[in-house]
Image (cartoon, rainbow, N blue to C red):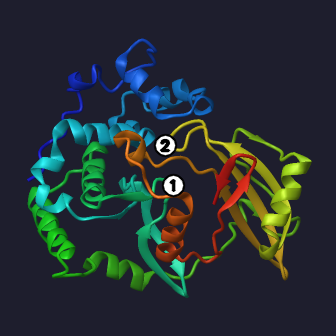
């Protein structure tokens, strides 16, 4: 049985989950070591955003989550399941699951693949269960025990099933549109709302993205958004409104970074192309994704 997470006991790391920004603490220095210098420019803002909220903290800094796993020696406690290694989402907190539309149907699955890599699949399960506990949701111990039992059967190829709740949710759901009219004005083809802070694309970047996205249509509006907090804080996101054959689509190009599991464990993970192929094979989105480079950065 999984035991409660010792959130306040971070003595082995030389610090605790920071209650405030303090650059002299070992915890701050450890966080700083996970990221590139350009992303660390927003480190203080990312810590402040998660201030006093352990759930948000581990959402914002997934590499620290794997340090917590390491400290609690959970891989030793669940050695019979840890030996199963395959594709993992790397950041499977509960907000990263939801309904996705594919081939005329809605299905329940992971909706964020930024941290996808290869590792013990058991860690995705632990991440999901502890994220619920950290968020203050009451997790029934019998339910957890049953979940672990079924999970182990699945790993051994003995059983595979969906929960009744998920089946009902999929059966009752209806097709949703690709464009939210509150975000893009379908008449003017411009964004009504933009994430902040945002900046316009340079002429050279817009020309490159027009070439990259030409198969999807013509870019009618665009902007650059850099999220200031959360797990993807400091990474660039290019937002596009695109028209093709009289229909509008929204496409977001997100900057890639090294997966959190690889960063925290210092393992050499799969290459970018291999990670991309895993996402496409599993996700099969409505609009086919593409691995593109701009300058020295990769986007998908």
Position in image of residue 186 (x %, y %)? 81, 69
Position in image of residue 95 (x %, y %)? 42, 55
Quarter location, residue 170: bottom left
Asked if the residues shown at circle 2 and circle 1 are in contact, with their CB atoms under 8 angstroms apart, the answer is yes
Indicate whether 97 appears above or below 247.
Answer: above
Q: For residue 78, say whether it is visible.
A: yes
What residue is disc 1 on? Answer: 114
Position in image of residue 33 (x %, y %)? 45, 28
Which callout, 2 or 1, points at the residue further toward the start of the chain?
A: 1
Horizontal relation, residue 225 to residue 154: left or right: right
Dot 2 surroundings within 10 Å: few (below 14), some, or many (20 or more)?
A: many
**126 and 169: which is toward the camera:** 126
Q: For residue 185, say whether it is visible.
A: no
- Give the residue drawn at x 85%, y 80%: 246
- Give the residue drawn at x 27%, y 25%: 13
Horizontal relation, residue 294 to residue 289: left or right: right
- Front disc: 2 or 1: 1
Question: In the rendering, which numbered label is found on residue 231?
Answer: 2
**294 and 10: which is toward the camera:** 294
Image quadrant holding the C terminus, namely bottom right
Quarter location, residue 145: bottom left
Indicate whether 11 appears above or below 219.
Answer: above
Element under disc 1: loop
Position in image of residue 187 (x %, y %)? 86, 69
- How far is mark 2 from mark 1, CA to CA? 9 Å
Q: Give the farthest residue toward the front.
A: 268
Question: In the rendering, which numbered label is found on residue 11?
Answer: none
**180 and 116: which is toward the camera:** 116
- Give the residue drawn at x 78%, y 67%: 213
Q: Give the farthest residue toward the top.
A: 24
């Amino acid at each position: 049985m999984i035991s409660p997470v010792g959130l306040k006991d971070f003595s082995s790391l030389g610090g605790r989950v920071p209650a405030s920004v303090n650059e002299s603490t070992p915890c701050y220095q450890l966080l700083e070591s996970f990221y590139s210098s350009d992303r660390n420019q927003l480190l203080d803002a990312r810590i402040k955003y998660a201030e006093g909220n352990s759930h948000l903290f581990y959402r914002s800094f997934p590499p620290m989550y794997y340090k917590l796993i390491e400290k609690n020696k959970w891989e030793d406690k669940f050695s019979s399941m840890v030996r199963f290694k395959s594709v993992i989402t790397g950041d499977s907190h509960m907000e990263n699951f939801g309904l996705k539309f594919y081939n005329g149907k809605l299905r329940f699955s992971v909706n964020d693949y930024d941290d996808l890599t290869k590792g013990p699949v058991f860690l995705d399960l632990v991440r999901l269960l502890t994220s619920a506990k950290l968020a203050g949701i009451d997790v029934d111990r019998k339910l957890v025990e049953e979940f672990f039992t079924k999970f182990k059967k699945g790993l051994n190829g003995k059983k595979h099933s969906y929960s009744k709740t998920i089946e009902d949710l999929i059966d009752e759901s209806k097709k949703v549109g690709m464009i939210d009219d509150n975000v893009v004005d379908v008449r003017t083809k411009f964004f009504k709302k933009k994430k902040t802070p945002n900046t316009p694309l340079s002429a050279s970047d817009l020309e490159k993205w027009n070439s990259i996205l030409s198969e999807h249509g013509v870019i009618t509006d665009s902007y650059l958004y850099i999220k200031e907090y959360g797990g993807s804080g400091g990474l660039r996101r290019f937002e596009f409104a695109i028209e093709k054959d009289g229909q509008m689509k929204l496409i977001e190009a997100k900057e890639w970074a090294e997966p959190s599991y690889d960063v925290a464990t210092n393992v050499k993970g799969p290459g970018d192309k291999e990670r991309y192929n895993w996402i496409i094979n599993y996700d099969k989105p409505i609009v086919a994704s593409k691995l593109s480079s701009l300058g020295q950065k990769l986007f998908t």
